[in-house]
Image (cartoon, rainbow, N blue to C red):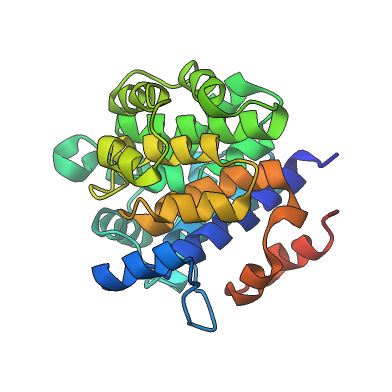
């Protein structure tokens, strides 16, 4: 049985692999359709990960250091990693927030000030949340609380927090139960705060008759707006349907297009908790850009 931090590292492994996989499919629309239809892996020898993984690494480091989310500490981790590598694909809102924090402004001033004072509801809060669910899988109430805290330094809008909570709860349920399909989504919904993301998950639950991820994406959205409400419901729908195979989950998720590195990161971070280290395709891991040394070395010590 894995310890909480081992579960978090496993989730990060799946998240980073999904992130790097999905990122490879930002190519010409005709090319991407052909690649997905043929299940042809992109030709680049190295699959680079993006800001999704960078921020999730900070989450895991925070959990390793403190066993909880200290928002001041986590904001500092986000900022340091951003300053070191600002070209990891951060969105415009994230650039503004993290650059302001790098200049010395506190997160609790910056985060609520963006988007006309509403705070961000972007999907960045959700893309980094699966390791939190993995770590707090034994206590769903605390999982929801910690996920909300993890959103605050950059995504203070209520639906930004809701996206992080829903994603973390789904990951926790996959790590701690055998739930899948509709039952997994319903259990996730029970812990998701009111708002657009919760409405989207309710719509996802009603898609029992839909088999095609592309059709589900047309109904739910797949991150084209880069906000939680049009990213999290589709991602959780994919994770609930394809939790027994990492490769199937990735091909299903990327076929929805949209913000495909983020949807694949979310699904990868969740599904890894069901399939385990042995269920992550080794050929894909060999292509993925290595994670920072302390995190990557930890992978080598994980049981199969």
Q: Quadrant of residue 136?
A: top right
Residue found farthest to the left = 116
Q: Would you place residue 184 above or below residue 62 in this image?
A: above
Q: Quadrant of residue 120?
A: top left
In-image side of 271 versus 202 (left or right):
right
Say how many tags the image has: 0
- Residue drawn at x 26%, y 57% is 96
> Residue 272: image x %, image y %?
65, 48
> Residue 85: image x %, image y %?
44, 72
Task: Residue 204: tell me if it is visible.
Answer: yes
Which quarter of the rendering shows the C terminus? bottom right
Q: Would you place residue 91 above or below residue 297 in this image?
A: above
Task: Work out whether residue 247 or residue 145 is closer to the camera in this orientation and state it.
Answer: 247
Q: Would you place residue 101 above or below residue 171 in this image?
A: below
- Residue drawn at x 38%, y 48% is 124
> Residue 112: image x %, image y %?
27, 38
Task: Residue 292: tell me if it is visible.
Answer: no
- Residue drawn at x 49%, y 19% is 186
Task: Work out whether residue 17 or residue 36 is closer to the camera in this orientation and state it.
Answer: 36
> Residue 260: image x %, image y %?
38, 56
In-image side of 93 versus 84 (left or right):
left
Which quarter of the rendering shows the N terminus? top right
In-image side of 70 versus 198 (left or right):
right
- Residue drawn at x 47%, y 36% is 236
């Amino acid at each position: 049985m894995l310890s909480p931090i081992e579960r978090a590292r496993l989730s990060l492994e799946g998240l980073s692999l999904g992130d790097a996989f999905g990122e490879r499919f930002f190519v010409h629309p005709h090319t991407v359709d052909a690649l997905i239809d043929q299940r042809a892996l992109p030709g680049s020898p190295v699959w680079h990960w993006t800001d999704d993984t960078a921020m999730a690494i900070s989450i895991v480091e925070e959990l390793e250091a403190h066993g909880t989310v200290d928002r001041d500490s986590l904001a500092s981790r986000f900022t340091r990693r951003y300053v070191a590598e600002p070209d990891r694909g951060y969105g415009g809102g994230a650039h503004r927030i993290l650059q302001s924090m790098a200049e010395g402004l506190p997160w609790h001033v910056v985060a609520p000030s963006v988007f006309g004072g509403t705070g961000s509801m972007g999907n960045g809060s959700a893309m980094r949340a699966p390791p939190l669910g993995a770590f707090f899988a034994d206590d769903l109430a605390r999982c929801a609380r910690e996920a909300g805290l993890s959103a605050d330094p950059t995504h203070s809008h209520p639906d930004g927090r809701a996206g992080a909570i829903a994603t973390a709860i789904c990951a926790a349920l996959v790590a701690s139960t055998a739930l899948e399909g509709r039952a997994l989504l319903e259990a996730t919904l029970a812990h998701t705060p009111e708002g657009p993301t919760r409405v989207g998950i309710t719509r996802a639950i009603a898609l029992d008759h839909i088999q095609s991820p592309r059709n589900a994406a047309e109904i739910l959205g797949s991150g084209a707006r880069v906000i939680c409400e049009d990213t999290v419901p589709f991602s959780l729908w994919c994770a609930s349907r394809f939790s027994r195979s990492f490769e199937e989950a990735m091909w299903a998720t990327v076929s929805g297009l949209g913000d495909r590195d983020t949807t694949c990161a979310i699904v990868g971070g969740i599904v890894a908790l069901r399939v385990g280290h042995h269920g992550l395709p080794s050929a894909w891991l060999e292509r993925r850009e290595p994670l920072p040394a302390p995190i990557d070395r930890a992978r080598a010590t994980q049981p199969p």
